[in-house]
Amino acid sequence: MNSIFKVISPVDGSEYLRREYATDAHIEASLSRAQKSIFLWRSTSIEERANICRKAVQYMVDHADVIGQELTWQMGRPIRYTPSELTMGFQERARYMIEIADQSLSPVIAPPVEGFKRFIQREALGTILVLAPWNYPYLTSVNAIIPALMAGNTVVLKHATQTPLCAERYARAFEYAGLPDGVFQFLHMDHNQVGQVIRDPRIDYVAFTGSVAGGAAVQRALGHRFIGAGLELGGKDPAYVRVDASMDQAIENLVDGSFFNSGQSCCGIERIYVHESRYKDFVDGFVALTKRYVLGNPLKQEVTLGPLVRSSAAVYVRDQIVQAVNLGAQTLISPEHFGINRDDSLYLSPQVLIDVDHTMDIMREETFGPVVGIQSVADDQEAIHLMNDSQYGLTASVWTQDEEMALGIGEQIHTGTFFMNRCDYLDPALAWTGVKNSGRGCTLSSMGYEALTRPKSFHLKSKF
């Protein structure tokens, strides 16, 4: 096995850094430390856990500019946005989960019965293995790391090899905050090593964010082990612009939802359905706003659209566009508008396709790039049918001024989250979950603590 891996920056194709994979001895020592730390950390008060986690979060926020620059080099998101992953979403989710921990983990008291004391206590599982992706390496990982620690678990983090510095930053933050040794650790591992760790009896739960194929690999590695796994997988998130939508609002938000992070977002907008009476106005406005993006070197503050993370991703996106065009779709944006004249560049111009239908991969398969198809529909029922015509079910949104109609549509859509006049956002007060091939399990909200703990019943008889 090659013990070294390199991070090739999508910014310029250079080697940004290299790291060593953990040795078998290092992995063994880490799992042993995690197991030995469980009792100490579990016996620590929730208040003390909260103080340590708050201090670690503040460390990350205080270093957001430096961390943001590291993140831009590792995965290519424009520098004008990367610090905000820490100062906004990361901080919001972490602080919310810290604040609700005491209430969420409080015992459930059974109805009184004379002579008995009965309650259900939430008990930490043990050691949580967190497998985090590169596209939002802090936003995705914080969903599991902070609540796992707040619940009294120890954590072992494995970040994508594209963003190893993120795992190291977490370690620095928790060391700064005074977290006891062994409670949080990270391991740089290859796929085979990850599988071995998943199968290790000292791992009590796996929190994975990534592709459907990756989720299937995690499930296979679990084999006959009787432990849980949270799997946040792919998405092909739809939006429906109703006849009564506020057009300016819908266009502004859906352009951003489609192209932010170069479309490399699990819950980004990948397909849009528009009522036929509003279709032309919507498409015209959508294209005009899209053309205002600035594509280029993400280290420049004026740039709003950076490269895709690697060449294989760019090839995949281009292939989807070619297939759609061959089947009759029309592209509305010339790459030359953004100065792109090479087919091998990681810098893809944003693309809008019309005359699309569900025979095309662009409307059925996850794209994970700066491309969106826009399809005209006759009415709500056609939109609902098409929105549900997918193997995925992460989020969906409707754009309308009629809340009652939105609720009625939402109840018919097969997704974990349904939005009205909003998209591409995680509210930490709400459960984050998916259906179908978007995965299983739940993070965030008070429900996010359930998978990270086990119920333990106490039945005490005081009179004989």
Image: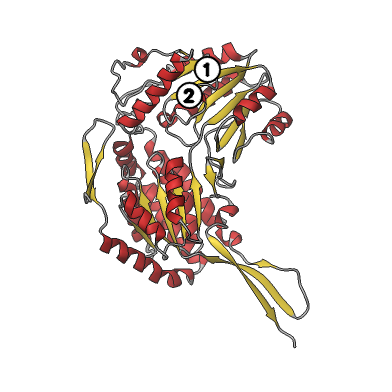
Residue located at (30% from left, 66% from top): 29
Precedes in sequence: disc 2 or disc 1? 1
Residue located at (37% from left, 32% from top): 80
In this rendering, would 301 be left or right of 23?
Answer: right
Q: Amino acid at mark 2?
A: Ile
In this rendering, would 215 be left or right of 314?
Answer: right
Please tell me whether residue 198 is drawn above or below residue 253 in the rendered image.
below
Q: Residues within 10 Å of mark 2 (few under 14, many from 20)?
A: many
Please tell me whether residue 135 is drawn above or below residue 382 in the rendered image.
below
Mark 2 to mark 1 CA distance (whole Å): 8 Å
Q: Amino acid at mark 1?
A: Val
Name the residue carrying label 1. Answer: 356
Front residue of 222/194: it is: 222
Label pair 2/1, CB-CB below 8 angstroms: yes
**Residue 329, percent from left and from top:** 48, 14
Residue located at (48% from left, 17% from top): 353
Front residue of 240/424: it is: 240
Res 35 quadrant in image: bottom left
